[in-house]
Amino acid sequence: MTGGRASSSSPSDLLQRIKGFVRSLVEDLSNCRPISVALDRYRNYCSDPSGNCTCSYDLPKGKEIISIEKTSHACRLDVLLKVLLIIQQLLQENKHGSKRDIYYMHPSVFVEQAVVDRAINDICILLKCSRHHLNVFVLPRLVMGWLRFLEAGRKVDCINSRSTAYSVPVSLEEVEDIVSVAKYILVVEKESVFQRLANDKFCERNHCIIITGRGYPDVSTRRFLSHLVEKLCLPVYCLVDCDPYGFDILTIYRFGSMQMAYDADLLRVPGVRWLGVFHSDLQNYHLPGRCLLKLTSDDKAKAEAILLRCYLPKEAPKWRGEMELMLQKGEKFEIEALSVNSLSFLSEYIPLKINDGSYI
């Protein structure tokens, strides 16, 4: 959140902000004022496909007031304060914890993981920092290929074993001395595809770096990818399922997510190229009809909502066209469908499409 981020987000600074926030709540209580919290709201896209909107990556779009006087807000404040206490302990003890760790500290209160995720996002806005500053992480994502770097003084030498999966660094601040002779970076949606390429020794035969966010990418993966692109100046290709959820993951890499719109400009990679899979691949690569699945009602609703995003007609009209074709045909298929005739076909498909320029 460029427009609202504090100049420093060190642990000591964050602890001071937490202390100030709690002090203001105590003052409200002592003066018999109802507790309320004002949060900036960010929006990196809207549902105006005309392109005449004013969405931006760095300016808040108004405020949201969370008041204890509303029953639903009271529960939300309770969760926010419990999560804030846990984060305070992590910062004080210089430890890291996962979002799942936090959930299991009060499962009866949090009810589901999404409640914790929302509280963490609220706390980022409240403290004017990014999520990685809070010492909160998710399960590690994976990287392999022609890459070497230091992480907290420890050498991570992917080049020495190019088909071995290494964890994406949790803290980018601890990464230095990045070295690579790769020609491009390939981002794959799924771990199963990552492992297929590892088994095929894809990186050894194709000078590249492969990263997977294991589905929807976490902050560490998106920061690391953005950092690699900045340091190595390499093209980035993304391979996702031909369905609305794969497309949504693709857009998060390029445009950022609405849930973390306050940090979208720091996490997105504007130059991402969509390598596939496309609906047209069915005919181009002679895939049998049994690979196709019908779009469900949820799939169709997801696709229709995505098509309304304001940035698609302005910045990615060809991407939008592919989504429209998918919705029109009412069909979807997974990356793994490319292996129907040969397990190793995926390793041929990727360099073929890159060399032919068959990406958008």
Image: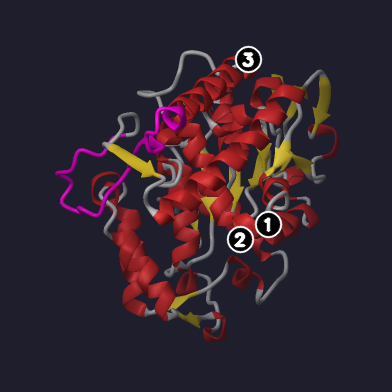
The residue at which mark 2 appears reads as: 111
Answer with the quarter of the image where residue 67 lies: top left
Looking at the rendered structure, the kind of residue marked 1 is Pro
Q: Is residue 298 magenta?
A: no
Q: Are marks 3 and 2 in contact (CB under 8 Å)?
A: no
Sequence-first tag of 3 and 2: 3
The residue at which mark 1 appears reads as: 107
Mark 2 secondary-structure assignment: loop
The residue at which mark 3 appears reads as: 12
Is 199 left or right of 278, judged from the image as shown?
A: right
Q: Which residues are magenta?
A: 28-56
Label 1: few (<14), some or many (≥20) within 10 Å? few
What residue is drawn where x is 46% and y is 28%? 30
At which x and y percent is residue 42?
34, 38
Q: Is residue 35 magenta?
A: yes
SS majority, magenta: loop
Looking at the rendered structure, the kind of residue marked 2 is Val
